[in-house]
Image: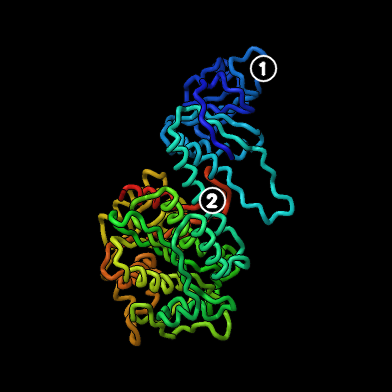
């Protein structure tokens, strides 16, 4: 899609489609106010109206699409409104949009119009080739929005790819290709290197699969003086539950269990392309949690990168086992902060639903900064407690800890399990078990991978700059 800027007023643009925002109860201009009353279009959120050009109309475009904003025209309302109509825009070769908030417009077009249809025998065709922005946009804002949308699309494509086509080393190769294109440093530790490095959590989880595990590290150096951020993302490319095997309903979407890893790869990609001064290192522990004679068993003890030991009491609580190794490895470089993201627990799904990401951390300042970044991005977050008394539930008779502490408050329990691997550094844990992958479409995309938290984390990195 080509994006261009035009100084022309909306009435003079000769596009195939002109998209105009309409606030509830307001006249859209261009002599269209009289038409609205006839068709009961009020401009409420969720309404849209397509009007072909007629002789005598006061605009040059072949058609006008009026899009209701409701009573708000902030960037979140614009992003959602444009995203909702984005699939319709593909019917027109050239589209001009006269909305405010250009970055929200481009993100809405790209995210709302996203499709993952490469596996269809007849992928849906797209005629949409040119987007013209009429709102006097800043070219830098246009470029940033494109980079952010590219990052979200990159992650969505990874998460939506069937697990059979994205085993751990496939994910590593996709990371290598991305890093090469963006001038990033990349390192992949294969199973042999993981054994030498003491990554017992990753090795244990991946032991049952014919596809060996790996650890992926991608780094953006920054300017060397603006500090560093360590990002860890759960990279379970498929989760059967291991010997604690899931039911079919729970297993059918488990290609999404590497959404945390995809998110962090997308964020470091954007950091490089935006030339952010802060240094960013993303680490993805990638493994398949499968069932075979070599699977880890309940009661087995794993030794992690930092020497800490874990008694495996639930093989379906595997995400925290691989994240523990990743966090310990990142902590060795002493970044200023550590942030991890994972599709980790059912409890956060029950507590916060499909719109809100849970955040838990050891540093209230960092947690607050992430929540603020989420509010700016339109990705709400809610802090859950790192409740110290619950740490007793992780006590083990044979190891330093168990990997689960019962079904109650499991999001908090998981965070308490991870905390000893952060070396006392400021740390925040994002549990987005629902928000990363949805079974229904939203204004910003079809069912499937959402790319949640990417825009938030990019905004957070920018705020550190």
Please report the residue visible at 64 percent of the width from the left and 12 percent of the height from the top: 56
Please report the residue visible at 62 percent of the width from the left and 32 percent of the height from the top: 94
Q: Is residue 346 visible?
A: no
In the picture, which quadrant includes the N terminus?
top right
Asked whether, in this view, residue 207 is left or right of residue 301, the answer is right
Name the quadrant containing residue 322: bottom left
Location of residue 210 in the rendering, given as x and y in whole percent from the top left corner: 59, 78
Query: Going from the N terminus, do you reach mark 1 or mark 2 first?
Result: 1
In this view, the residue in front, 174 or 428, is 174
Name the residue tied to disc 2: 153
- Marks 1 and 2 sit apart, C-alpha to C-alpha, by 38 Å
How many other residues sit within 10 Å of disc 2, few (<14), some (14-19) or many (≥20)?
many
Q: Is residue 99 above or below residue 352?
A: above
Name the quadrant containing residue 169: bottom right
Location of residue 282 in the rendering, given as x and y in whole percent from the top left corner: 41, 62
Please report the residue visible at 37 percent of the width from the left and 43 percent of the height from the top: 376
Q: Which mark is residue 54?
A: 1
Asked whether, in this view, residue 259 is left or right of residue 162, the answer is left
Colour scheme of the rendered structure: rainbow
Looking at the rendered image, the disc whose residue lies closer to the viewer, 1 or 2, is 2
């Amino acid at each position: 899609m080509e994006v261009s800027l035009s100084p022309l007023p909306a009435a003079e643009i000769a596009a195939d489609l002109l998209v105009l925002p309409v606030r509830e109860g307001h006249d859209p201009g261009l002599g269209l106010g009289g038409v609205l009353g006839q068709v009961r279009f009020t401009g409420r959120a969720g309404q849209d109206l397509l009007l072909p050009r007629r002789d005598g109309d006061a605009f040059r475009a072949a058609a006008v699409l009026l899009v209701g904003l409701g009573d708000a025209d902030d960037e979140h309302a614009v992003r959602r409104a444009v995203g909702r109509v984005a699939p319709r825009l593909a019917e027109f070769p050239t589209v001009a949009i006269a909305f405010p908030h250009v970055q929200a417009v481009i993100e809405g077009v790209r995210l709302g119009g996203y499709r993952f249809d490469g596996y269809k025998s007849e992928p849906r065709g797209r005629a949409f080739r040119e987007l013209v922005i009429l709102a006097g946009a800043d070219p830098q804002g246009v470029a940033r929005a494109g980079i952010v949308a590219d990052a979200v699309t990159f992650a969505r494509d990874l998460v939506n790819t069937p697990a059979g086509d994205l085993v751990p080393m496939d994910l590593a190769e996709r990371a290598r290709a991305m890093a090469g294109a963006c001038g990033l440093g990349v390192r992949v530790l294969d199973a042999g290197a993981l054994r030498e490095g003491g990554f017992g959590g990753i090795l244990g989880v991946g032991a049952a699969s014919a596809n060996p595990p790996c650890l992926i590290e991608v780094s953006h150096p920054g300017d060397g003086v603006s500090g560093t951020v360590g990002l860890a993302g759960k990279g379970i490319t498929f989760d059967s539950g291991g010997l604690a095997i899931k039911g079919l309903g729970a297993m059918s979407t488990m290609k999404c269990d590497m959404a945390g890893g995809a998110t962090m790869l997308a964020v470091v990609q954007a950091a490089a392309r935006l030339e952010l001064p802060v240094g960013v290192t993303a680490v993805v522990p990638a493994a398949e949690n499968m069932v075979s004679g070599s699977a880890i068993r309940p009661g087995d003890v794993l030794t992690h990168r930092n020497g800490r030991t874990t008694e495996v009491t639930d093989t379906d609580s595997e995400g925290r086992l691989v994240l523990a190794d990743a966090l310990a490895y990142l902590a060795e470089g002493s970044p200023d902060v550590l942030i991890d993201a994972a599709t980790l627990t059912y409890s956060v799904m029950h507590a916060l639903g499909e719109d809100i990401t849970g955040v838990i951390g050891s540093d209230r300042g960092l947690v607050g900064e992430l929540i603020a970044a989420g509010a700016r991005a339109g990705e709400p977050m809610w802090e859950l407690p790192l409740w110290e008394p619950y740490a007793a539930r992780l006590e083990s008779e044979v190891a330093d800890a168990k990997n689960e502490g019962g079904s109650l408050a499991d999001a908090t329990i998981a965070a308490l399990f991870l905390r000893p691997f952060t070396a006392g550094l400021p740390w925040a844990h994002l549990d987005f078990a629902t928000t990363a992958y949805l079974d229904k479409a939203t204004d910003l995309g079809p069912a499937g991978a959402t790319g949640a938290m990417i825009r938030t984390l990019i905004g957070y990195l920018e705020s550190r700059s």
